[in-house]
Amino acid sequence: MLETPFNIEIAGLTLRGTLHLPGTAGPYPAVLWLPGFGGTRVECHRLFVDGARQLAKLGVASLRIDFRGCGESDGDTVDMTIGSQVEDARAALAALRTHPNVASDRLAVIGFSLGAAIASQLGAEPGLQALAVWSPVVFPVPIFARMGLYAAHPELARQGWIDCNGRKIGRDFLAELTALDPLGALSTFGRPLLVLYGSDDTVATCENAQALLEEIPGAEGACLDKANHIFGSVKARTWLLDRTATWIEGKLLGVRV
């Protein structure tokens, strides 16, 4: 297994990521990992790191990225928008697709939380064969309103940004949330969709994931009892990573599950 830094230039900035390649001969099917709001390519409890390494053992490559303004990537959160995150994801998927050790027609995306909503916008990207979402944000406006972040917040009128746990979140980000419609975008996806969530998620509450399972044809998924938004127990993270790896193996490597 080989893990190397992987940089992507976009809009005069550098997105920083980590590329995982299995030790066997390529080209390999590959997965792009998209973190949640304010998250990084490591994610909570190293979920993305351990998940990518687990896939590499199965012969699947991975690219984990930090969105601009997050983690080690250039930029500032005040300039981050939904549109910029979609652009980052598309640029990362294109870089993965054109890598000489990647099978360009066998790609998948794993999106966590808001990263799931960003992933929903990638359905037209060439080579994308499957999408897995964890604790998906499907109805973003009420979720962010419960966090105290909303487009009519008085701080936005006064200074153009809101202080969110020490990060500046700009008005354009919150304004674009109102137009973000993961359910509508995925209604025409037409390829395998995996939805995994916890019964005790108080952030992207259960109706978010359930809407995908009920309204997207062919969507499959499961709910883990007593798991929270970040799958914050050994039992929950093991369940999440094992289910995802088995599913990805089946969709990208053709292994029956």
Image (cartoon, rainbow, N blue to C red):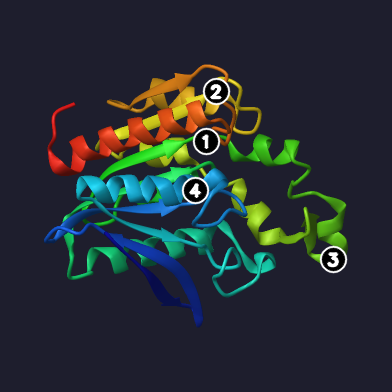
Q: Answer with mark 2 or mark 1, whichever residue precedes in sequence.
A: 1
Mark 1 or 4, closer to the camera: 4
The residue positioned 22% from the left and 69% from the top of the image is 98
Dot 1 amino acid type:
Val
Dot 3 amino acid type:
Gln
* Closer to the camera in the image, 16 or 69: 16
Label 1: which residue?
138
Which element type, helix, strand or loop, lies under badge 2? helix
Residue 199, position in %: x, y? 56, 20
Mark 2 and mark 1 residues within 8 Å of each other at the beta carbon? yes
Q: State the CA–CA distance, disc 2 to disc 4.
A: 17 Å
Dot 4 amino acid type:
Gly
231 versus 159 height, above or below: above
Residue 225, position in %: x, y? 52, 16
The residue positioned 44% from the left and 64% from the top of the image is 87
Q: State the CA–CA distance, disc 4 to disc 3.
A: 27 Å
Mark 2 and mark 4 residues within 8 Å of each other at the beta carbon? no
Label 4: which residue?
115
Q: State the CA–CA distance, disc 1 to disc 4.
A: 11 Å
Label 2: which residue?
207
Which picture quadrant has residue 156?
A: bottom right
Quarter of the image that includes the C terminus: top left
Which residue is outermost to the bottom?
A: 12
Q: Answer with mark 3 or mark 1, whichever residue precedes in sequence.
A: 1
Local crowd size for mark 2, using a 10 Å CA cut-off: few (<14), some (14–19), many (≥20): some
Mark 2 or 4, closer to the camera: 4
Label 3: which residue?
159
What is the number of callouts on the image? 4
